[in-house]
């Protein structure tokens, strides 16, 4: 014989206060757990979305980021002459030598300074990155002290708005455009003509060169030739993989720290669920004895109480995920460990995070309700009626 499922639903409704408090504790844990995973997922999506599978990037061998890389003009000329590089309809090679530097800018509202990454680019940089689109203003004009800024820079930093002025490299630079990049890390950067940036900072070298490949199979040959060239000391990577690597350390740090905190919270939630279920068993001793007298086996009673605990956990987990989903409307910023610049990104909820959060909540319900369920199933009929 199997105990009807509505028995568990009725008992949870009858004890609404304890149900609410226990489910609330589980919801809090799942909220934190989901938020941590969404934060790490948002960081990864932001950086991975910065790159393209069609592009390759060349840096000095051993450099962990563009900020640490240096390529002189001779190396740039050699790299740009490779046959695997695609060309635009006018026959111009799609290869852009870029310069990356860091400056301090005060934030709007707080006036606190933070590192912002400036990227010196070529016209080909925009062609190779179709996700970058101007939403206001125009592109910079070569030879002038003009910049375009990512949406996050325009919103967060003083002087970053359209028509405003930013000072760096002993010059005042006018913001002539604001761009978006489908949420990619470029939205946290300032873009300027590379030659102007080199002159302003008196740099004789570039940071990297990004190129679009003619075909998907050209990467291997390009990589082997450039890395074996005795005139060069470089490493070649796919652009998307390069930016994905930059997210690994930080995303792992967020996950480890967040899950550690979540595990501590989950212990409290499981103890709360266990106390609730033990109290439920104690208050329903007569019911348990009656069910045993009616012929319900111990495993049915065990299953009914365990289902009740899992149902309680599922309710709490669902509420926690629902609350966490609203975090997608918020943007956070932190220092990118790879570049030391500020990076803005959003919480992103994915189906895998929903599934992982639900599994975690059910695990809390199982471990929190198993011992009370076993206790209920082991009650003897005579002892149950005597206790009443």
Image (cartoon, grey):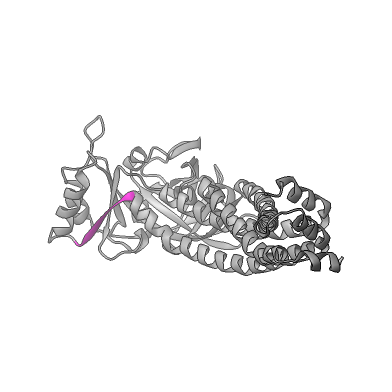
**What's the residue at 54%, 42% (across, down)?**
163
Please determine whether, in this image, residue 46 is positioned above or below residue 264: above
Q: From where the camera sits, is residue 63 visible?
A: yes
Task: Name the spot of residue 180 as percent of width and height, x first.
Answer: 49, 41
Task: Name the spot of residue 309 as percent of width and height, x first.
Answer: 69, 57
Boundaries of the magenta span: 233-239
Q: Quadrant of the C terminus?
A: bottom right
Task: Name the spot of residue 290 as percent of width and height, x first.
Answer: 80, 56
Q: Is residue 295 left or right of residue 189?
A: right
Which of the two residues, 89 or 287, is positioned nearer the viewer here?
287
Which of the two residues, 12 or 378, is positioned nearer the viewer here?
378
Kindly report the secondary structure that dominates the magenta region of the rendered protein. strand
Q: Residue furthest right?
A: 388
Task: Name the spot of residue 260 as percent of width and height, x first.
Answer: 56, 69
Q: Is residue 30 left or right of residue 140?
A: right
**What's the residue at 34%, 60% (across, down)?**
202
Q: Is 5 within the magenta? A: no
Which of the two residues, 289 or 334, is positioned nearer the viewer here?
289
**What's the residue at 56%, 49% (across, down)?**
354
Please tell me in which quadrant of the rendered image residue 360 appears.
Answer: bottom right
Please tell me in which quadrant of the rendered image residue 371 appears.
Answer: bottom right
Q: From where the camera sits, is residue 157 visible?
A: no
Which of the two residues, 135 or 32, is positioned nearer the viewer here?
32
Q: Is residue 228 left or right of residue 386?
A: left
Q: Is residue 17 left or right of residue 349?
A: right
């Amino acid at each position: 014989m199997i105990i009807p499922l509505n028995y568990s639903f009725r008992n949870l409704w009858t004890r609404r206060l304890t149900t609410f408090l226990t489910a609330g504790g589980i919801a809090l844990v799942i909220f934190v757990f989901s938020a941590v995973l969404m934060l790490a997922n948002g960081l990864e999506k932001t950086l991975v979305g910065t790159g393209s599978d069609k592009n390759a990037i060349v840096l000095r061998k051993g450099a962990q980021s563009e900020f640490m890389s240096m390529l002189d003009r001779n190396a740039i000329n050699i790299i740009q002459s490779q046959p695997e590089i695609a060309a635009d309809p006018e026959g111009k090679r799609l290869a852009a030598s870029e310069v990356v530097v860091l400056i301090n800018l005060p934030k709007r509202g707080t006036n606190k300074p933070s590192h912002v990454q400036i990227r010196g680019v070529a016209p080909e940089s925009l062609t190779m990155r179709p996700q970058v689109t101007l939403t206001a203003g125009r592109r910079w004009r070569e030879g002038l002290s003009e910049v375009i800024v990512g949406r996050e820079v325009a919103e967060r930093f003083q002087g970053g708005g359209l028509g405003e002025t930013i000072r760096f490299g002993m010059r005042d630079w006018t913001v002539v455009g604001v761009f978006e990049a489908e949420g990619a890390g470029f939205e946290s950067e300032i873009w300027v003509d590379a030659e102007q940036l080199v002159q302003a900072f008196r740099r004789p070298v570039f940071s990297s060169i990004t190129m679009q490949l003619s075909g998907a199979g050209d990467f291997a040959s390009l990589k082997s030739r450039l890395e074996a060239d005795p005139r060069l000391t470089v490493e070649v990577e796919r652009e998307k993989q390069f930016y994905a690597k930059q997210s690994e350390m930080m995303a792992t740090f967020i996950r480890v720290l967040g899950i550690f905190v979540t595990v501590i919270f989950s212990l409290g939630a499981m103890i709360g669920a266990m106390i609730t279920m033990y109290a439920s068993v104690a208050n329903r001793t007569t019911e348990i004895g009656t069910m045993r007298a009616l012929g319900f086996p111990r495993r049915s009673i065990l299953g009914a109480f365990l289902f009740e605990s899992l149902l309680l956990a599922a309710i709490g987990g669902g509420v926690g995920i629902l609350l966490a989903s609203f975090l997608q409307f918020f943007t956070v910023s932190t220092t990118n460990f790879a570049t030391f610049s500020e990076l803005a990104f959003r919480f992103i909820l994915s189906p895998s995070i929903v599934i992982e959060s639900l599994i975690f909540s059910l695990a809390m319900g199982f471990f929190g309700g198993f011992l009370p369920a076993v206790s209920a199933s082991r009650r003897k009929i005579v002892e149950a009626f005597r206790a009443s």
